[in-house]
Image (cartoon, grey):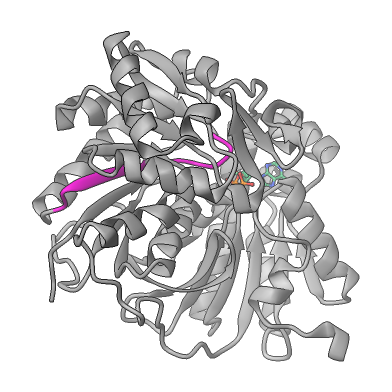
Amino acid sequence: MNQGILLGVIADDFTGASDVAGMLVHSGMRTLLTIGVPVAGVVDADADAVVVALKSRTVPADEAVRQSLAALAWQRGCGARHFYFKYCSTFDSTPKGNIGPVIDALMRELGTDFTIACPAFPVNGRTIYRGHLFVGDQLLSDSGMRDHPLTPMRDANLVRVLQAQLAQRVGLLRQDIVARGAAVVRNAIDVLRSEGVQVAIADCLADADLHVLAQACADMPLLTAGSGLALALPHVYRERGWLQPNPHAARLDPMVGPAAVISGSCSTATNAQVEAWRGAGLQALAIDPRALARGEPVVERAVNWARWRLDREPALIYATAGVAELQAVQAELGVAHSGELVESALAQIARSLVEGGVQRLVIAGGETSGAVVQALGVQALRIGPQICPGVPWTQAQGRPLWLALKSGNFGGPEFFLQALKLNLHAA
Ligand code: ADP
């Protein structure tokens, strides 16, 4: 029985959208992911959730607000009853936003005076204690995120980070409260509300905490979180009889055809993945941002290089660089300019490869994935099985084209090999 769309998710980047959609599918929710707000409002009649992928993380705040409100209006038009603003598990933002301004606008539009903010993703090592975000054993501010090209995160105290972006008062739902269960959390929220707090950073150390938060907050018109909470929510919907899980929610057409990896992330995890690929002796080509800036035909060269190789085995094309190299390029070319040059080049390369027959594409980097998916003209994605927590395979709706969109920080060193099922140890 189709019960209509239960949940509308607004994601601030494309990898985040595929991450959260993967979580919902994994928990049995039929989920459609649209790239941007669809022009014509046709929704899969069987979907329980619609995820709108925006590329709003690093655009000016008023533009992020405009896009997010457009997504909300579209989802409301589809009949969605609950809403979820999804941002990165490392809370990627700048002092100007965009997480705070978007939360503010969505709350106003939905007429709600309270929500939580919880980027935790314990299975991937993102935990929050006393409002401080940890990446594995390190505070966010000591992790590789300190040197992110676009959103360097140098303060791990999320109450302070979010307060700098919001006029409303930001508070904290402490872990010792969360550990005592949903009823205690609800009481604590009442207290926070009476103190004038409108957004509370929610501590979370383990999946059990996410389940408590989902139980305590599932009724709220708006939740804001990383993808972790989306793993817990469907269970609560089921307990309440709002959702009937679908065992085939993650089914895609069988994956076939030539494969390539495009990497524009400079995260610690992606650097290790590029190293592992090269270390395995697989074909790889580096893109030089300085050559792009000089106007050299870097894209054409890369496409020609790949054309002769892809029938034999997958190839990696990457701009991924270590911190020192990245900083040198950014100092020379400017942060925004170098980022745009690289994104645009990788997107053009991806489009040419797909036009040339590539059907399976692994893309590393949130902004990079956004640029590539837009260049490929993909409008909606079906969500398939997980490669690793946070990264599912997806299929472009109605096309024999499969995409894995990997947020920079995700995946172990062998992620690219794992995604393409390259069993090198047997070779
Ligand atoms: P992540 O998911 O790791 O944050 P993104 O793709 O979102 O990755 O962001 C990485 C940014 O860094 C992109 O704008 C990309 O174009 C840029 N970039 C990648 N490689 C380089 C490089 N060698 N020099 C300068 N900028 C780069």
Q: Quadrant of residue 420?
A: bottom right
Q: Determine the residue positioned at 35% across, 16% down.
A: 192
Q: Residue at (59%, 33%) from the top-left corner?
A: 128
Q: Is residue 250 above or below residue 317?
A: below
State the residue at coordinates (50%, 43%): 209
Task: Residue at 73% x, 56% y: name it.
Answer: 287
Q: Is residue 299 left or right of residue 81?
A: right
Tell me if residue 192 is in the magenta stretch.
Answer: no
The quarter in which the C terminus is drawn is bottom right
The front one of 415 and 328 is: 415
Q: Residue 379 appears at what percent x and percent y?
A: 31, 65
Q: Is residue 227 left or right of residue 156?
A: left
Q: Nearer the viewer, residue 226 or 190?
A: 190
Locate residue 1 relative to residue 422 in the image: left or right: left
**Which quadrant of the frame does ligand 1 lie within?**
top right
Say whether residue 89 is magenta: yes
Q: Is residue 122 above or below residue 245?
A: above
Question: Which is nearer the eye, 203 or 368?
Answer: 203
Q: Quadrant of residue 120?
A: top right
What residue range appears in magenta?
A: 80-91
Q: Position of residue 366 (x, y in %)?
A: 54, 50
Instruction: State which quarter of the image contains the N terminus.
Output: bottom left
Q: Position of residue 386 (x, y in %)?
A: 54, 71
Determine if residue 324 is in view: yes
